[in-house]
Image: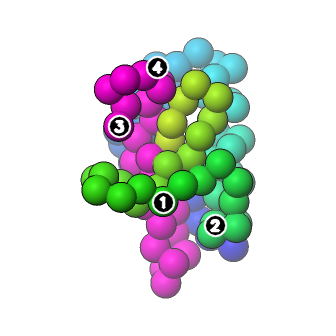
């Protein structure tokens, strides 16, 4: 089992969202305790963050340290042409 933590930036972005969206994103992020055996997760190439999680119209960017067993949620963005 991994520990899921949020950066200050990600926590602030979640607070700005509607409550229903925020709850859905947090619920999906909590499933990352089973990383690397998760669905809707993709490893990113040439991106500042290692992975992304797809949650509806939102994308959660995060890094995973397998040796320390920590998932650090870095950013939460609404999917549009500027997301990646």
Q: Secondary structure at mark 1?
A: strand
Tag in front: 3 or 4: 3
Q: Is residue 81 magenta?
A: yes
The reply to whether callout 1 and callout 2 are in contact (CB within 8 Å) is no
Q: Which residue is mark 2?
A: 35
Give the residue at x 49% y 49%. Answer: 52
Vertical order, 10 against 62 (above or below) = above
> Is residue 7 left or right of 21 when viewed as pictured?
left
Q: Which mark is residue 84?
A: 3
Tag in front: 4 or 1: 1
Vertical order, 11 against 74 (above or below) = above
Task: Pick the residue in front: 54 or 81.
Answer: 81
Of the 4 image quadrants, the one containing the C terminus is top left
Q: Which residue is mark 1?
A: 43
Q: Which residue is mark 4?
A: 16
Give the residue at x 59% y 15%. Answer: 18
The reply to whether callout 4 and callout 1 are in contact (CB within 8 Å) is no
């Amino acid at each position: 089992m991994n520990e899921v933590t949020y950066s200050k930036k990600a926590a602030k972005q979640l607070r700005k969202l509607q409550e229903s969206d925020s709850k859905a994103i947090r619920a999906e992020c909590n499933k990352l305790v089973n990383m690397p055996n998760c669905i809707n997760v993709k490893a990113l190439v040439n991106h500042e963050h290692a992975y992304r999680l797809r949650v509806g119209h939102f994308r959660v960017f995060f890094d995973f340290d397998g040796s320390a067993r920590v998932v650090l949620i870095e950013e939460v963005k609404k999917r549009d042409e500027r997301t990646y």
